[in-house]
Image (spheres, rainbow, N blue to C red):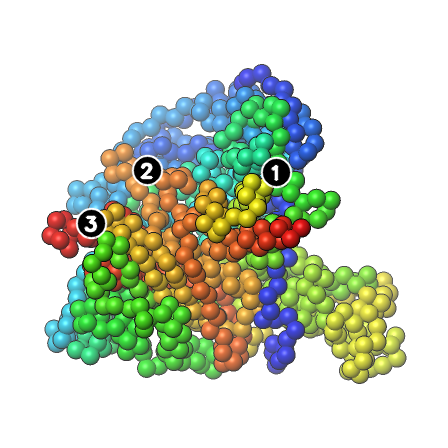
Amino acid sequence: MAAWPKEPRLIGTKVPRLDGLAKASGKAKYPSDVRPEGTLFGVVLYSPHANATVKSIDTAAAEKMPGVKGIVVIAGQGKKLRFQGDDIAIVAAETEEQARDAVRAIKVDYEVLPHCVTESQSMDEKAPQVFDGGNVRKARAIVKGKPEEALEKADVVVEGTYSLPVITHVCLEPHGLTAQAEGSSKITAWASTQAVTVVAGELAGSFNISPADVTVLTEVMGGGFGSKFGADIWGRTAAELSKKCGGRPVKVFLDRAQEHLAAGNRPSATGHVKLGASKDGKLVAMIAETYGTGGVRGGSNFPLPYVYDLKNSSRAHAEVSVNAGGARAMRAPGHPQGCAIMEAALDDLAAKLGMDPVEIRVKNLAEVDNVRGGRQGETINRTPMYEAQLKLGAELIGWRDKYKPRGENGKGVVKRGLGVALHQWGGGGAADKQVSCTINPDGSVEIKSATQDIGTGARTILAMITAEVLGLKPTDIKSNIGNSTFPPGQSSGGSTTTPSMSPPCLAAATQARAAFFNKIAPALSTDAETLSLKDGQVWVNGEPTMSWKDACRKLGMASISETGKFADGLSSVGVGGCQFAEVEVDTETGVVRVKKIVAIQDSGLIIDKLTWESQVYGGVIGGLNYGLFEERVMDPTTGVMLNPDMELYKLAGASDIPEIIVRAYETEEMKNRGVIGVGEPPTIATAAAIANAVANAIGVRVPDWPMSPRNVLNALASKEGKA
Amino acid sequence: MSKKIHVSTTVNGESVEFLCEARQSLLEVLRENLSLTGAKEGCNNGNCGACTVMLNGVPVNSCIVLAVEVEGAAIETVEGLACHGHLHPIQKCFLEGAALQCGVCTPGFLVTAKALLDKNPNPSEHDIRFNLANNLCRCTGYDKIVKAVQAAAAELQTR
């Protein structure tokens, strides 16, 4: 049975990322940096209107412009354009400026139609239809127990409406790829993607060729957060343009405005919630009616009730379509929304009961909340784990000394408050992934797989595992990923990369070591069973006997190459975490400053403590952004986005960041579960904890995220009856 | 289409001449004409700082500097930070302190930090956060970036 080493040298230590040197020296070639000989630049013409039909399109003048080599029309005559940013055509030219000039020279006659770009616009009975069949699709309520009855019997009930806006991914590197077609039979693409294999499949599909004839390369890339799984229409069109232009590479990367408009977003969420409890704070029922918009794509549903034990609940969700770009997965899809709404309602209930927020949470954890253990069939109860995490988090934020009940945070203008929230996530491994491990006679070792490192540390983790098995340093291993032609690798999403790729990597390295021992044992006049590897040496019967390099020379001309497959017992699924926030709110200006965040996270066995920690810090900053700043602002009158840039679309900078304390909840029990991903969980609870801290500070719930001055001042005004 | 303009400048200590259109940004010329792709295009609007380079010692967003403006100027990019194959202490501290993840914002942070330390070798944490405020990062949470700059300042002081 496959198992992780009992006394690892490398696993669980802090190893700097292997691609860090290239990145820190400016030498790393991102897909948007790659420019093969003869590259043409593609620029997208996109819809300036929220809703329109293309009456006619004329590219004749554009085609004659200097430097223009090809134009592909995506939305021809009669085609519907459903949002600002919808693709119309792509021009390929010798320079970017020439392509932009030509885009401006394309004549489009639009029939501009009425639009709805906000949920309230769209839900109006007289609203124009985004799609035939209505703008609001209401699903039947999911009912558990007898919520109406239980709510009537509840000692205390709170009722509130909470809402989170649409936000966008804002990856620092925009979406796009450079494609080079060899006739109709082969394509090479340098893509900024979270899934080289998915992009290869899509490009193959559009050329009607085998994915084996497509090579997608992603050496490094600049962030995806769930928005970069496909080739997209612009990527497929780049390949088509390359073919059209005699095989010259065509580079299409979006500009920042298009990123906001067309390259994905997180759906909004609004919940009208009734939550009831007995006098002692035990929840008895929840009734929630929710809606959200994923623009023209849907997907706004989210988990609710969330984390806590509710024997009686009813939840009805409505999907609202609007004339805005389609939603895509965004770091823990649905969870930050469900968490924020659940935790806000629970906190309001605690305030009404005069109960301590930590206490009410402990009280409402399910008696049994089982997730998978290390092996198939084994389980772990998450409840005691949450309890331990809450205890640790409360200590680290200084809950006992600092916490005061809601609204009792002094008479001054600036008020301090504390908040807490819990979250959960899955994050297991896929069983069909592979890694190959090659040991060469010159002592070099290379591992290969068609996965990619999107900034998470995947490349480094695979090298660490291999180095652990072969007694080498991580820097001795060439960790070759980001190539779709390599053994099948996992997409970087759902916190599944590490749990999917670590088991086949361990298997490949272990098999390669066994083959290596068999091969060199005769040359060392011993049996393979007597051999071991440590500190760059081959050991015979526990004595260092020969350097790794010298031993590899004994392989003669033939390299050793083994392909490892997934094995059960090395990775698991299902994590929990909690976060605490301390904030300061200026009640005159409405400005919220976060002073401190504590994040406690479990994720099974941690391979690289350094990149693990980075993932949690990054998750927290993402959550802080959702909590304080981020919001897509649509103009109901003109139908356009008002802040499609990186200035008015607010993101935290270095001076907005509080003290952040990150702790791994890594008990022996957790380690025995094996590897679980951590990319998503730590981003879930932050915005919820911040909002609860704000309510604690100012004595009134700010029901709308982000906790911007406007939303905070509105809440304060409503408290004073001025709203 | 306009006539190309001849520009003479210094990039990372070496004399460089290039031809560009009047409308081309310094960032575009660095990346496309000179193949220096260390500076990144994050927003092309002067908001994110990923394209930061030093112009006569001052950090600028190269996406909103016209290439023709750098006639006679000295430009320093991230590629010029390392010396004879040795990383600059700022680079080393970013690397060892895990102050980078996807890495697209990193060149901008490194150049901005270099400009700060050149001017103020002993900055307070507030100075660092204030000076880095024009550089946006979506991955790291900034904490490790600030610590890396502090570590680099300490290392440079001992030299």
Q: Are marks 2 and 1 on the same chain?
A: no
In space, the residues marked 2 and 3 are separated at their CA atoms by 21 Å
On screen, residue A94 above or below A18: above
Q: Residues within 10 Å of mark 3 (few under 14, many from 20)?
A: some
- How many marks do you count on the picture? 3
What residue appears at the point 25 percent right and 68 percent down from the top-left corner? A404
**Who's the residue at 80% across and 68% down the image?**
A548
For mark 1, does the 10 Å Cα neighbourhood hold few (<14), some (14 to 19), or many (20 or more) residues?
many
Label 2: which residue? A642
Image quadrant where residue A539 sits: bottom right
How far across and how far down the image is residue B123, in percent? Answer: 52, 48
Q: Which residue is mark 1?
A: B77
Chain of the residue under the numbered disc 3 shown in the image: A
Q: Kindly state the secondary structure of the residue where label 2 is placed.
A: loop
Numbered disc in front, either 2 or 3: 3
Amino acid type for the residue under numbered disc 1: Thr
Residue A666 % position (x, y): 49, 75
Q: Mark 2 to mark 1: distance in Å?
A: 33 Å
Q: Which of the labelled discs sits on residue A119, or is there none? A: none
The circle drawn on residue A714 is 3
- Give above or below for A415 relative to A101: below
- Amino acid carrying label 3: it is Asn
Q: Secondary structure at mark 1?
A: loop
